Each structure stands twice: as C-alpha cells, then as structure tokens.
Amino acid sequence: MSQEDMLKLENQVCFALYSCAKEMTKLYQPLLKHLGLTYTQYITMLVLWEHDRLNVKELGGRLFLDSGTMTPLLKKLESNGWITRTRDNQDERSLLIELTEDGAALKDKAKDIPLQLFCRSGLSVEEALALRSRMQEVLCRIQRFQSVAEADLDG
C-alpha cells in the first residue's frame, strides 16, 4: 500500500473501529430506552452490577472515562435513584459509588439486552465472542505498547 493510500479514510483502522463502535452503540439505544439508560450509563451499571461499591477513580478506570465525564454521568444515575455517592470514611477525597435497591433491581430488566443485541447486529454469539476476544487482545497490546513508551519517556 502506498503512502497516499495509507491516508485514505477507508484504510484507517482507527476509523473502522470508531464507526463500528458508533453503529454498535446505536443498536443499543432502543434496547436501553425502555430502561431509561444511555449507553454510557448502561456500561457504568454493568460494572456496578459486577462490583458494587467502587470509588469514582476505579469505576472510571474500568470504563476508560475521566472524572469530567464521570461526574455528570453519576449525578444522573443518582438522580434516577439507581446509585448513591458518598465520601469514603477512610479517605475524604474519595467518592464511593454504590447501587441502590432500585439500581440492583434494574439488572433483571437488562438481562436480555446482550442476546437482543446479537440478534440486531447480524452476528452469531460465536462471532460476537470471537470479535470481543480479538478486540480485547488489541486493547492489551496497545496498553502494553503505551506503558513501554511512557517508561521510555520517563527514563
């Protein structure tokens, strides 16, 4: 591939990932609408359903979201009655996020969403799992590369 071809939008891995992620998120919208959740709120709840009582930094780290994004997101989830935000007695700087009873109960209402998404995506469960596995592998490689590059810059 020539350098000129490498600059074409359709040849960009980043654009393929970006546009696919955007379309995948669109598939979630009608499924989440009846729960009153946005996609970002949904993935936040997924983390909390798995690991309740996390601080904002841990939660943001799991989601790859910064505190500027997390704050309004968590305020909205709290105003909907699904989480509480309280200061950590051990560290006043740390804000703990916990599910309410309603937030925990929302999990039952969301349990069919993954299967419904497979149906809407045109992917089989096996294809979706293989794709997810490959994407996780790519993410790990990128993170390892970034860690090495940051260490080189620091040292």
Image (cartoon, helix red, strand yellow):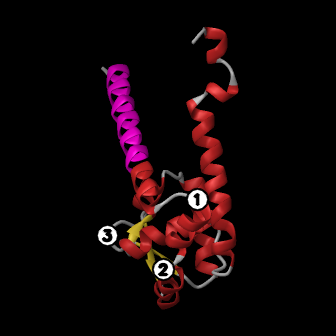
Residue in view at x 40 percent, y 38 percent:
138
Using the image, tell me which numbered label, if any, was put on residue 90.
Answer: 3
Q: Which residue is mark 2?
A: 111
Find numbered disc 2 in the image and state the secondary structure of the residue it sits on. loop
Query: For residue 18, which quarter of the picture?
Result: top right
Residue tagged 1:
122
Q: Majority secondary structure of the magenta segment? A: helix
Which residue is nearer to you in this view: 133 or 75? 133
| Label whose residue precedes the other's in the sequence (1 or 2) | 2
Marks 1,2: beta carbons within 8 A: no
Going 60% across and 9% down the picture, which residue do you hit? 2
Q: Give the Cα distance between marks 3 and 1.
A: 48 Å
Q: Residues within 10 Å of mark 3 (few under 14, many from 20)?
A: few
In the rendered structure, which segment of residues is drawn in magenta? 133-154
Locate residue 118, reporting x and y percent: 53, 65
**Label 3 to label 2, Cα distance in Å?**
34 Å
Position in image of residue 133 (x %, y %): 37, 49
Lateral position of residue 50 relative to residue 118, left or right: left
Dot in front, 3 or 1: 1
Mark closer to the chain start, 3 or 2: 3
Q: Amino acid at mark 3?
A: Gln
Q: Earlier in the sequence, mark 3 or mark 1?
A: 3
